[in-house]
Amino acid sequence: MLSNNIQDALNAQINAEMWSANLYLSMSMHFEAEGRKGIANWFYIQYREELAHARVFMNYINQRGGRVELKAVDAVPTTWASALDAFKATLEHEKKVTALINNLFAMAESEHDYATRDRLAWFVTEQVEEEDNARTLIDKFSLIGEDGMGLYMLDQELASRTYTAPSILTEE
Ligand code: MG
């Protein structure tokens, strides 16, 4: 069984993943409205990944005989000044998520809940990738600027991103 502490913390993480999902869906809708379909596509895939993260935590709580408790998800921002601005906001947000995952990992370890710690290990690795993806795009948008051909090319590049369910979800 999960301890009450761990169950509450995992439920809080589900809420955080759903906030992340809404953040990226909001970014997707913003860029779609601005006619930047490729950037909108990239954030829509990101939205789907965050929903999958929430689902992984839900499955895990249920597997451990716990109870999923869904709470209200806070409102997310709705506009960004530029694509660079949105990717900078993405990196800052992912750093916060990394801190949440690390705190959860430390809590699981201190409670000797090694099953939870091992599940969280996947997310530790995932966060390295999330931060790296955001940094790479910040670099590209910083380098190329957001006028004319450069922006068109980056928009085309981001249009090609496709969704793959996280391995941790498909293996279950
Ligand atoms: Mg996530």
Image (spheres, helix red, strand yellow):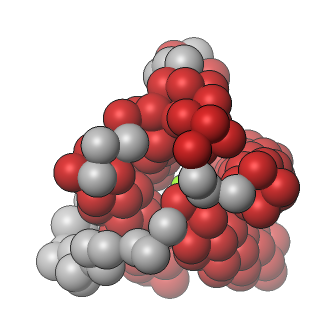
**Residue 16 drawn above or below residue 127:** below
User: Closer to the camera, 112 or 58?
Assistant: 58
Q: Which residue is drawn at 36% across and 59% down?
A: 27
For residue 116, which quarter of the picture? bottom right
Residue found at the very far left of the displayed protein: 72
In this rendered view, identify the residue nearer to me: 102 or 68: 102
Residue 97 visible within the image: no
> Quick check: which quadrant has ligand 1?
bottom right
Percent x, y for residue 126? 73, 46
Residue 80 placed where, x, y %? 41, 73
The residue drawn where x is 21% and y is 51% is: 33
Residue 53 visible from this viewpoint: yes
Instruction: Give left or right: position of 82 versus 79.
Output: right
Residue drawn at (55%, 35%), measured in percent from left and top?
152
Furthest residue to the front? 148
- Residue 140: percent from the left, percent from the top? 78, 49
* Image side of residue 95 versus residue 66, left or right: right
Vertical placement of 14 versus 44: above or below?
A: below
| Residue 53, percent from left and from top | 48, 46
Query: Could you tell me which residue is drawn at 36 percent across and 35 percent down?
Result: 37
Horizontal relation, residue 27 to residue 157: left or right: left
Total marks drawn?
0
Q: In this view, does 63 lie to the left or right of 151?
A: left
